[in-house]
Amino acid sequence: MILSWEDTLEGAQVPDDGRNVVIHEFAHQLDQDNGPANGAPWLRGRGRRARWARVMSAEFGALQQRAASGQPSLLSDYGATDPAEFFAVASEVFFEQPQQLAAEHAALYRELSGLYRVNPLSW
């Protein structure tokens, strides 16, 4: 992975704006661990994968609707591009704005917390 140093510094300047190129690109790397980036990183267990698919699909669809209608969202409209970008954008917000994500998108927060095996709310 190659990152622009300028974009890396810019993403770190405001630690709670929900925008961070390093987190975003590392999320893509995790997503590609099991093949092409598709918003579904490797998860252990069929039930876990099914729950992930349900939650992510619902949240992705909701973001697409908000973006299409011009409604504001905690998640960047760029995440409405495709499931891989949705996962990366959601990861940025998970680490940089965990309180807001947990409050507005509780199921999404739980899925990301389980994937990353951390709870940023406790930091």
Image (cartoon, rainbow, N blue to C red):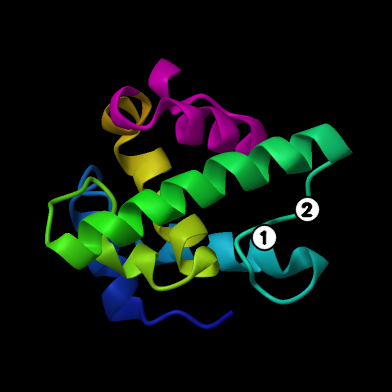
Asked whether the beta carbons under mark 2 and mark 1 sit within 8 Å of each other, the answer is yes
- Tag 2 residue: 42
Disc 1, SS: helix
Q: Residue 107: where, in percent of width, then height?
A: 49, 29
Q: Residue at x 12, y 62 (%)?
A: 70
Q: Is residue 95 visible?
A: yes
Disc 2, SS: loop
- Residue 94 lies, with reference to residue 60, above or below; the image says above
User: Can you name the residue that lies furthest to the top here?
Assistant: 122
Q: Which SS type dominates the magenta stretch?
A: helix
Q: Residues within 10 Å of mark 1 (few under 14, many from 20)?
A: some
Q: Residue at x 29, y 51 (%)?
A: 75
Residue type indicated by callout 2: Trp
Please say whether residue 65 is one of the residues in the magenta stretch.
no
Rendered image quadrant of residue 48: top right
> Foreground residue, 82 or 30?
82
Q: Is residue 45 visible?
A: no
- Residue 27 lies, with reference to residue 52, above or below; the image says below
Residue type indicated by callout 1: Leu
- Residue 6 lies, with reference to residue 111, above or below; the image says below
Instruction: Return the mark for residue 30.
Output: 1
* Magenta highlight range: 103-123
Where does the C terminus fall, quadrant-wise? top left
Q: Residue at x 23, y 62 (%)?
A: 67
Rendered image quadrant of residue 54: top right
Q: Residue 101: where, in percent of width, then height?
A: 33, 33
